[in-house]
Structures are given as C-alpha cells and as structure tokens.
Image (spheres, grey):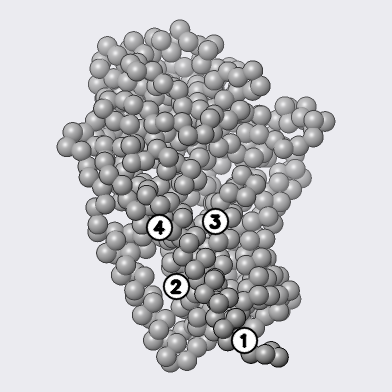
Amino acid sequence: MTRTLLLCLFAGAVVPLAFAPFYWWWIAPLSYAVLFVAWQDATPRQAFVRGLAFGCTQFLFGVYWIYISVHGFGGAPIFVAVFLMLGLVFAMALYPALVGWVAARWFATGGRWHWLATLPALWVVAEWLRGWVLSGFGWLAPGYSQTESWLVGLAPVLGVLGVSWAVFIIAGALASALRGSRHDRVVAGIVVLGLFGAGFLAGRIAWTVQKPDEISVALAQGAVSQDLKWLPQMLQPQLDLYRELTVESLGSDLIIWPEAAIPEYYENFALWFDGIERLAADAGSQVMLGTLKFHSAGAQNAVYTLGQPESTYIKRHLVPYGEFFPMPDFMRPWIASMNLAFPDSQPGEPGQPPVELLGERIAVTICYEDVFGSEQLHSFPEASLLVNVSNDGWFGDSIAPHQHLQIARMRSAEVRRWQLRTTNTGITAVIDPYGAVSAALPQFESGVLRANVAGVTGSTPYILWGNVAVLLLAAVVIGAYWARTKLTMRPGT
C-alpha cells in the first residue's frame, strides 16, 4: 500500500470531524484538498482506487451508527448488520471513486483551473446523484459541515448543494496553493476570500419577512429507550407519559409529539386520542402527534393534527432497509422476526400540502425526510413554518442524532423559516431562520421545550430555483471545458 493511498484513507477518515458534534468545519475542504492532490497525474485506475479508499473511511467512520440501529435495536445478527453497513459504505464510496475515474479518463486531475473548476463541478454533480439515485442517501454532504462557517450564508441562494460546491472549490484552491505557482496561490487566495465573503454577505440578507404575531409552542420529548419502545407492556406507560407531557404543555398554542410517540395504529386508539384533543382544546391548545396509520398493505408513518381543522400527513420518502425491504419473499419471515418499527411501510402521496393551523401553513416532514431538501420545495413559499418529528433513538448515544440536527438546521437556512423539531430521545430543538439552534432539550431526558416563534413569508432564491441553478452552472463549467478542448485541438493530435 503506497503512502498516497494511506494518505487518502486518513483524509477520508477525518472528514466526519467536520460535522456535528465536532463542528471542525475547516477539516472538510482540507480533506478534499488532500484527495485532489492525490489525484494529480493519476491514471483512471489509480484515481478510482484512491477515491474509493477516501470514501470508504469517510463513510465507515461517518455512518458506523447504522450497525447500532440494525444490530443493537433491530436485532439483526452481527454478520447481517456488518454486511448492510459495509454495503452502504462501499456504495457511497463509489461516488468519489467515480469522480476520480471520470476526471482522469476524460478531463484532467491537476492544474489550477481543473482544481478550481472542473473537479468541483464534477463532484457537485456526483453529490446531486447521490442524493436521489436508488432512493438517495445525502448524509455527510460536505455542505452540511458548514453550518458554523460563513459559507452557510449561501444556503438560501443555492441550497446545501451550492454550499457543498463552495467546499469543493475551496479544496481546489488549497490544492492549487500547495502545488501551483506563486500566481496560482494568489488566485487561490482570492477565490477563498471571495467565497467566504459572498457567504458572509448573503447571510446578512433577510430574504424573507417574519410575521408580527407569534405562536407559543411546546415540544414533548418522551425519552423512551428504543429497546423498550415497541414492547407490548410499554404501550400503557407511553400513553400515560405523553398525556402527562401534554398536561404540562397546556396553554401553548401548539403541542407537538415526536415520530411514532404512540407505537400503535391511530385507529385502534381513536377514543383515547379524542380525549387528548378535548383536553388540549379546553386549554386553547392544539396537538400534532406522530403515530401509525393503518393501511391494508402495511403501516403508514403519520403525523395527525387534532382539533379544528384536523389533518393527516403521511411520510412519503421511506428508508430502505428501515421502512421497506427490497428483497425476495423467502427472506420476509426473517425480517418479520426482527425488532423493526415499520416493516414494509407504505408511503404517502408526493406533494402533500402544508398543514393549515393557527393562521400558519406548516411544512411537515418525518425523520429522514428532512435530508431531501429539494423534495420539500413544493410547500414554499406558501409554508410559513417547518415541523420535523423524528426518533433518533434508533442510533443510541452516537454521532447520528447530532448529524441529523445539523441537517435540519440546513433546511431552515435554505428557506429562512423557523423549524420545530421534536424527537423521542433527542435532540429536540427550535431552529431559527438562519439555521441556528435557538433552544434545545438534553438528550435522553423526558421534558417539554417551550418557545415562541413567528411564521415567515416570502421566498429565498433557493425556493425559486431549487437545485436547477447549481446543476446549470456545473453543466456550463463542464461544457466550457469540452468546448475549450475542441477549440484547442489541432489536426493530428
């Protein structure tokens, strides 16, 4: 194993440190810069292997918590959990591997303009593909690592994909400064300062307008351990727990429970939920709660709004191997024996409208759906608030809940709206329109988080054009390279 390959393995391994809960955001561009330098003058095969090595350690250390979910709480045998985790790691590592191979095969992997232009453009296209191919897995997109840097100011303009592109360009600038001439270093410095300056200035633009009237909210965190949550004998204690948390929250305009707070079909406990509705209504409150909805082909993960008007939102983007299982029928009895919450869940319809409540229009997402920011844009600019209910108890005391909160923060920054994020074991939080955590509850502690928030009107540029702007810009950069190549070709070359 060469020193270059070892360096790629190390650079990938430290990438997760750029994300929550560490927040060493500067590691992301540094790590990608190492890979850019490692790709210089590499053959397509070498670039593929080095990109694969980088991606394998990046995702192994970044999403190791999948093992906790599948084995620790799902009950799958160790070898199955390891296989599923490593399978995902390898699949995600193919993206940087293919970027390196494509660049070495058809473009170039060294030189100022390749580091600053073509490589970042190719990589941002790969990140876009990673976000939707085979259902998509946008976790650890480099843009999320920048919630603490000025680059987050680009989120309302170009979304997380645009912030990721900025990270790649800065990585290219660092590579150019390290390997280029004095002139290259000057250009690299201008590019880095320009991007951070643009993020700083864009972050100071309001983009949207906050309404004058606030609503009071109470977010209930039950903190029921995942290894107990789905036991039949724990159902009554959870019914009692969330009733008590609701009583504690009475008087707030809106009370929100987390995903699957009551792990049973709504239809089986309709009378009990009616009692919760009356209890809240008598105090001038309304309740949004996560539970299951019956479907003839399997459960649906839903958020019900009690009171007037009533509404139901059904999770539409399901988690592969978490909520549906693309596998042969002969394996399904074994899956049924595992301690999984939603085997073969049924998705809701795409394009479900915002929930109209308390004079606001609320864009609702359930758990993993908030990773797919572009899928939520149909709700805007009509939606004035964001609500996400989740259950990160599946991942125990790992880095996953912190990463997930950071992803939610980016969603608020993109559309410049308040977000109410309610979870089972944490991290329950109120996120402001700039993506900062305004208030939060400690993990693994039962309690109620109270806050006052205001609806927001107006559109950010990202709401208007989504990922189209980034993809068009990337196409222009890649197309310009090909045009330049054609124009500079000479007969016989």
Q: Secondary structure at mark 3?
A: helix
CA gap, disc 1 to disc 2?
A: 30 Å
x then y, percent, for residue 16: 53, 59
Closer to the chain start, of discs 4 and 1, is: 4
Query: Looking at this view, is 74 or 273 the one in front?
Result: 273
x then y, percent, for residue 452: 24, 35
Q: Which mark is residue 170?
A: 2
CA gap, disc 4 to disc 1?
A: 35 Å
Report which residue position mark 1 lands on.
Answer: 489
x then y, percent, for residue 81: 71, 44
x then y, percent, for residue 270: 48, 10
Closer to the chain start, of discs 3 and 2, is: 3
Report which residue position mark 3 lands on.
Answer: 128
CA gap, disc 4 to disc 2?
A: 16 Å
Q: Residue furthest top?
A: 271
Query: Looking at this view, is 124 or 492 the one in front?
Result: 492
Q: Which mark is residue 158?
A: 4
Closer to the chain start, of discs 1 and 3, is: 3
Q: Nearer the viewer, mark 4 or mark 1?
A: 1
- Circle 3 packing at 10 Å, graded few (<14), some (14-19), many (20+), is some
Q: Amino acid at mark 2?
A: Ile
CA gap, disc 3 to disc 2?
A: 19 Å
Q: Secondary structure at mark 2?
A: helix
Which residue: 37% across, 63% down? 151
Closer to the chain start, of discs 4 and 3, is: 3
CA gap, disc 4 to disc 3?
A: 13 Å
On-image quarter of the N terminus: bottom right
Q: Are marks 4 and 3 in contact (CB under 8 Å)?
A: no
